Image: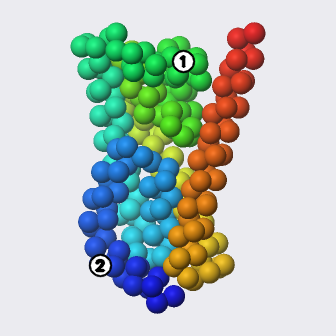
């Protein structure tokens, strides 16, 4: 309990540095960072409004960067093999990416490891940026709220089970692994459904 209190006080005393770090990490990784932020909100180390706004700003910044990378690659490296792989992966899982990109944006946001490549492909396909940003903002607003809430609820359950810092960390790691597995299974189910539609 003493170690946990020290951790909470340390994070709370440096919360704006924590927000800045969370903002930067959200550009590359979303679900795990948001879940961790939700736990820190439950521990009263982070302010819920500040944490949410910094996370949302980070994910939107990341989305704009990934879209811009896709647009740049279309203009300068259209035959790049990594880009070709990313496009084929997205089209395989979400074949409606060209016909209905707005539906695809929402679905890909909830499939671990697929969102960035999807946004890159949308940039590559030159989907109108204004509409992309509008749909992405709404999707990110909902997505960020869901995962921060998941982290908060998990933090509540974990603290009910133990107040020992080491056990809390073990529970967090196990929970994050389980979350990643669930999202991978979801991606597999969607892929199978899309394959059946093609038959």
- Specify the quadrant that holds the C terminus: top right
> Height in image: 98 above or below 19?
above
Mark found first going from the N terminus, 1 or 2:
2
Give me the residue at 43% from left, 66% from top.
48
Residue 156 shown left or right of residue 43 in the figure: right
Q: Position of residue 8 (x, y in %)?
A: 41, 79
Could you say where residue 104 lies in the image, as x and y percent from the top left?
Answer: 53, 26
Which residue is under mark 2? Answer: 13
Asked whether disc 1 touches disc 2, contact meaning CB atoms under 8 Å apart, the reply is: no
Tag 2 secondary structure: helix
Q: In this view, does 160 lie above or below 114?
A: below
Tell me the colour scheme of the image.
rainbow
Q: Nearer the viewer, residue 168 or 59?
A: 168
18 displayed left or right of 151: left
Label 1, label 2: how far apart the Cα atoms are:
46 Å
Does 40 sit above or below residue 34?
Answer: below
Residue drawn at (34%, 15%) of the image:
80
> For residue 71, which quarter of the picture?
top left
- In the picture, the disc for residue 91 is 1
The residue that appears at 66% across and 46% down in the rendered structure is 182
């Amino acid at each position: 309990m003493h170690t946990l209190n020290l951790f909470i006080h340390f994070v709370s005393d440096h919360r704006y540095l924590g927000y800045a770090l969370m903002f930067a990490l959200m550009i590359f990784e979303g679900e795990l960072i948001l879940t961790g932020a939700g736990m820190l909100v439950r521990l009263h180390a982070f302010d819920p409004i500040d944490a949410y706004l910094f996370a949302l700003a980070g994910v939107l910044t990341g989305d704009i960067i990934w879209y811009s990378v896709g647009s740049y690659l279309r203009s300068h490296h259209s035959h790049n093999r990594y880009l070709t792989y990313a496009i084929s992966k997205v089209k395989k899982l979400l074949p409606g990416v060209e016909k209905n990109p707005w539906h695809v944006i929402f679905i890909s946001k909830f499939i671990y490891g697929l969102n960035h490549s999807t946004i890159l492909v949308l940039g590559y396909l030159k989907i109108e940026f204004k509409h992309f940003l509008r749909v992405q903002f709404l999707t990110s607003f909902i997505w960020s709220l869901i995962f921060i809430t998941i982290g908060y609820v998990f933090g509540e359950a974990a603290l009910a089970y133990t107040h020992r810092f080491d056990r809390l960390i073990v529970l967090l790691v196990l929970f994050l692994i389980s979350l990643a597995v669930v999202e991978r299974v979801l991606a597999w189910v969607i892929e199978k459904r899309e394959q059946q539609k093609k038959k």
